[in-house]
Image (tube, helix red, strand yellow):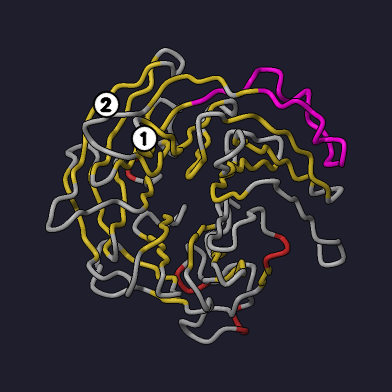
Amino acid sequence: MEDDAPVIYGLEFQARALTAQTAETDAIRFLVGTQSLKFDNQIHIIDFDDENNIINKNVLLHQAGEIWNIGASPADKAVLTTCYNKTCDSRVVSCASVWRMPCDWETGSSHESPDDSAHNPQTLELLCHLNDSAHGNASSVLWEPMGDGKRVISLVDNHALLWDLQESSTQATVSSTVTLEGKGQLKFTVGKWSPHHNCSQLATANDTAIRGWDLRTMSQIYCIENAHGQLVRDLDFNPNRQYYLASCGDDCKVRFWDVRNVQEPVKSLEEHSHWVWSVRYNHSHDQLVLTASSDSRLILSNMVSISSEPFGQLVDDEELSDGEDAQPILTWYRRVSFTTDTQSGGVGHF
């Protein structure tokens, strides 16, 4: 695509929530949630046609409030979750809900054009709330990565709640909980459900620490104190190496861990000049790692030495010395980003 013009999609409102729709196998599709205090918020459904280098899009209304987190069901492409703010009794609370897209939304898909603003967007159908007032404000919802779309985890202040979805996701019950205990007002900032070990492990971050949890016993199995010098922003598991975990944070670093030995990171990257908000492994080639930062850059790195194929096809053996990784192979600047907010960056699956 070096000869192709950059594909740019503009949003009317600020946005901080972005995810890939993994249940959709016939298209490259992303969901973006907006944040507006004055107008109805929206879910933008963005299809990228890589053959013609164009974007198809549709817009659905999310009238519940400004969206801070969005997640797509791995089993049903019409189902998604959002975490959003709403005003209740003169105070702002953070809620989580499960939604279904209208069954005929795809018939309205169109290429981006000036006339799209006149199109009347459809509204999401509420399936159920994931709210437990006894635990606090929801910050994110995680879908079971290899599951049938029947289990989710919500991070609510210092609690992780495991929910069972029933009756076509119209009912949700809490099956078990994990509580982060310690001094001060501890809160989970981010979590990642491992696709390994039969989806029985969860990694979470609070402040500068990373913790692992066994979902069968709801007990802590490892802790990486001071994993970063400042707040940990994101986590991702290597799709092929079950014990490898990537993290990033406000110290501008990306670190890779073997959770069997957490004394030191396996590898560290310091390519960004500001907070690193997101880190993602490529699902097919785990040596490729994409990071997004509020330095307005997306960086694709080739982490050959810690991949499942350390002498893979992307880099010739003769080009690297022992234990050496390739330098960043691609850097994108802000003009290709979906988000309109300069203080955050996000990447979906790739």
Task: Indicate the quadrant where residue 175 lies.
Answer: top left
Residue 174's label in the rendered image is: 2
Q: Secondary structure at mark 1?
A: loop
Residue type highlighted by circle 1: Ser
At x 70%, y 47%, the residue is 11
How many badges with numbers are in the image? Answer: 2
What span is colored magenta in the figure?
99-122
Please state if 83 lies on the left or on the right of 100 as rendered: left
Between discs 1 and 2, the one toward the N terminus: 1
Please state if 157 lies on the left or on the right of 348 as rendered: left
Q: Nearer the viewer, residue 268 or 31?
A: 31
Which image quadrant: the N terminus?
bottom right
Please state if 135 lies on the left or on the right of 2 as rendered: left
Q: Considering only vertical position in the picture, is 77 above or below 240? A: above
Is 182 magenta? The answer is: no
Percent of width and height locating residue 12: 70, 46
Judging by the rendered image, the residue that carries numbered circle 1 is 90
Q: Which residue is situated farthest in the front direction here?
A: 90
Q: Considering only vertical position in the picture, is 40 above or below 262? A: above
Percent of width and height locating residue 40: 60, 33
Q: Considering only vertical position in the picture, is 1 above or below 132? A: below
Q: Nearer the viewer, residue 237 or 347?
A: 347
Percent of width and height locating residue 305: 48, 74
Give the mark toward the camera: 1 or 2.
1
Q: Which residue is situated farthest in the top direction here?
A: 167
Q: Nearer the viewer, residue 245 or 276?
A: 276
Mark 1, other Cα within 10 Å: few <14 / some 14–19 / many ≥20? few
Q: CA distance from mark 1 to mark 2?
A: 28 Å
Q: Which residue is situated farthest in the bottom direction here?
A: 321
At x 82%, y 67%, the residue is 2
At x 87%, y 41%, the residue is 114
Q: Nearer the viewer, residue 48 or 32?
A: 32
